[in-house]
Image: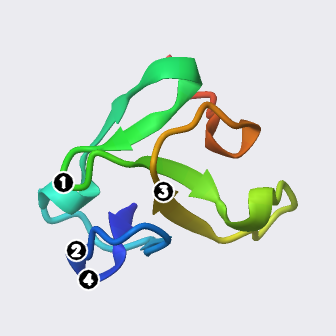
């Protein structure tokens, strides 16, 4: 996953992109089961709090909402 064009503005789309080790592709576990992007220090979330297959993703400030909770396999 990569922040589109490496832009760190809130609401920037997150897309699939070939791995290139950019910080915009690096994610760390955060509070409340969130994923925090290394470059933007914002959380991965679903657009509009959607949960259906195919829901788009974006970055936004971490807020603990259900749209920012992820289950990462061990």
* Tag 3 residue: 60
Describe residue 44's horizontal placement relative to residue 9 as left or right: right
Q: Nearer the viewer, mark 3 or mark 1?
A: 3
* Tag 4 residue: 5
- Between disc 1 and disc 2, whose residue precedes? 2
Badge 3 crowding class, 10 Å Cα cut-off, few under 14, some 14 to 19, many 20 or more, is many
Residue 74 in the image: state x and y as whole percent: 49, 16
Q: Secondary structure at mark 1?
A: loop
Query: Which residue: 25% across, 55% down?
Result: 40
Query: Which residue: 23% across, 63% down?
Result: 19
Name the image quarter holding the N terminus: bottom left
Distance between the alpha carbons at the discs numbered 3 and 1: 12 Å
- Between disc 4 and disc 3, whose residue precedes? 4
* Tag 1 residue: 39
Badge 2 crowding class, 10 Å Cα cut-off, few under 14, some 14 to 19, many 20 or more, is some
**Residue 6, numbered circle:** 2
1 and 2 marks in contact (CB < 8 Å):
yes
In front of the other: 73 or 67? 67
4 and 3 marks in contact (CB < 8 Å):
no
């Amino acid at each position: 996953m990569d922040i589109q064009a490496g832009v760190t503005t809130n609401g920037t789309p997150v897309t699939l992109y070939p791995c290139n080790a950019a910080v915009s592709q690096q994610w760390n576990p955060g509070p409340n089961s969130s994923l925090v992007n290394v470059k933007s220090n914002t959380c991965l979330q679903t657009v509009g709090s959607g949960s259906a297959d195919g829901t788009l993703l974006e970055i936004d400030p971490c807020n603990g909402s259900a749209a920012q909770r992820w289950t990462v396999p061990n």
